[in-house]
Amino acid sequence: PDMAEQVELAALARAEQRAHRDRHFTLSDAGKGAVRLSGRLGAEAAAVVRAALEPLCRPVPGDERTPGQRRADALEDICRLALSTDELPDHGGDRPQVVVTVGYDTLVRQLGPGLLDTGETLSPEAVRRLACDAQIVPAVLDGTGQPLDLGRQRRLVTGALRRALVLRDGGCSFPSCDRPARWCQGHHVTSWADGGPTSLANTALTCTFHHRLLHHGGWTVHIAPDGRPEFTPPAWVDPTQRPRRNRYWPRK
């Protein structure tokens, strides 16, 4: 029995070594605005990934995503959280970041797509959604597109404003959502590109899923007279379109 156990342990060690040696993760262009993910992990690494993803894979109110779609969104949420911290190493002298280049008229009037620094393009709707909580760097270009002058970065949702949003909303302000504040972004009630101010009276905390729903799902949000966000569903969800609030987070 002792020898059999030693043989099993040796086999397990060799299997783990092979799994570690063969680990890989790739992102490849799949065309039509999509990127294909593929890879292989050892059991230990996969357990870490599952432990990180599973709390974010629970369905949320109004959620019609498949389990695979929820896992994909959870991976994006985790990466967004990592990018919002100061813990990642610098990349080319800057903090890791997603860079989108778009003309001012394009952003304001939704006339065309934005360009990622990786070469892919984003729809006008996606650019405006990202602009809700981003750093904006104004640039003056010459006729050939060469930069002549770069302004300073401007954080649309500042630290002080974000702290105020967290105190007011608690977490995602969408009705019945329990996503905590650290997973949320600042959403402009009246879009910044449409002239909406960056103020407590014009912003609400939303998780990634409900942020996208506000931009593309027919829902609207406004700040009620008592200062709380209220959400109006599209008619196909509720024909009466009765405004709703998040009652999950305790109010201080």
Image (tube, rainbow, N blue to C red):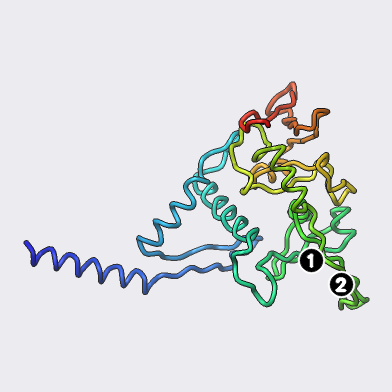
- In screen coordinates, is 173 left or right of 137? left
Q: Residues within 10 Å of mark 2 (few under 14, many from 20)?
A: few
- Dot 2 corresponds to which residue? 150
Tag 2 secondary structure? strand
* The C terminus: image quadrant: top right
Q: Position of residue 52 (x, y in %)?
A: 48, 53
Up the image or down, 2 lies above or below 207; here it is below
Who is closer to the viewer here, 45 or 164? 164
- Splitting the image into 4 quarters, where does residue 97 fall? bottom right
Q: Residue at x 88, y 54 (%)?
A: 108
Who is closer to the viewer here, 75 or 161? 161
- Splitting the image into 4 quarters, where does residue 228 fall? top right
- In screen coordinates, is 35 left or right of 206? left
Q: Residues within 10 Å of mark 1 (few under 14, many from 20)?
A: some
Q: Position of residue 174 (x, y in %)?
A: 67, 36
Q: Residue at x 44, y 53 (%)?
A: 50
Say what amino acid the circle numbered 1 marks. Answer: Thr
- Dot 1 corresponds to which residue? 101
